[in-house]
Image: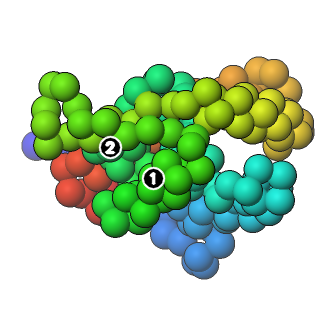
Amino acid sequence: MTQSVKKTSQSEADALRPLSSLPEALSFRISRLAAINERSGGRYFKREYDLTLVEWRILGLTATEGMIHFTTLRDTLLLDKGQLSRTIKALVARGLIETRNSEADARQIDLHITPAGQELNDQALRFTSQRNAVLAGVLTQAERAEFERMLDLLIGHNQALLAKGITNG
């Protein structure tokens, strides 16, 4: 009786290799990069635009869509409903976004960008564009395209796992 032995590629072997320390974990490294990026960006956004990063993300996503559902924002940003509500109220109080009951579903709230919100978004987006260029400045154009492709792949895969309730892959 012959057994078939599946050959393991080098990338599969690396993925199956047990970690010897936390800093080797991909999730830790991604989290650390995000934390570094958020710390430096957060200071600038607060100083220049009086926005937290969560406020900027809500404003930016609302501006991108023109109108966005509350639940879409919650699902995209993975925020607690209470935190999202408080942050939206702060943006409404500043006149940057407006909320309306959804025409499609009375239980749903829609967010709309105001002219002041659009102006602030445009300023913040220019900075973000410059910041992205600096952040990825160590990569060639081909490396950046490949990195963005891989990020999209990882985000999609992990989003699907989260939706299925899978936490360990």
The structure residue drawn at horizontal position 46% and vertical position 24%, both measured from the top left corner, is 65
Q: Is residue 67 left or right of residue 96?
A: left
Q: Residue furthest bottom?
A: 21
Residue plotted at (44% across, 38% down) = 98
94 lies left or right of 45: left
SS label for mark 2: helix
- Under circle 1, the secondary element is helix
Residue 120 got which mark?
none
Q: Callout 1, which amino acid?
A: Ile
Query: Mark 2 and mark 1 in contact (Cβ < 8 Å)?
Result: yes
Residue at position x 57%, y 41% in the image: 96
Q: Where is mark 1, residue-wise? A: 88
- Give the x, y percent position of residue 94: 59, 50
Rendering coords of residue 55 (x, y %): 57, 52
Residue 107 seen in the figure: yes
Q: Is residue 26 visible?
A: no
Does 74 sit left or right of 166 as displayed? right
Number of numbered discs: 2
Q: Residue at x 20, y 57 (%)?
A: 165
Q: Residue at label 2?
A: 70
* Residue 93: image location, x then y, percent: 52, 53
Amino acid type of disc 2?
A: Phe
Q: In this view of the protein, which residue sits in the foreground, 166 or 19?
A: 166
Task: Please state which of the two labelled residues, at mark 1 or mark 2, is closer to the viewer.
Answer: 1
Distance of mark 1 from mark 2, alpha carbons? 9 Å
Q: Is residue 12 above or below residue 129?
A: below
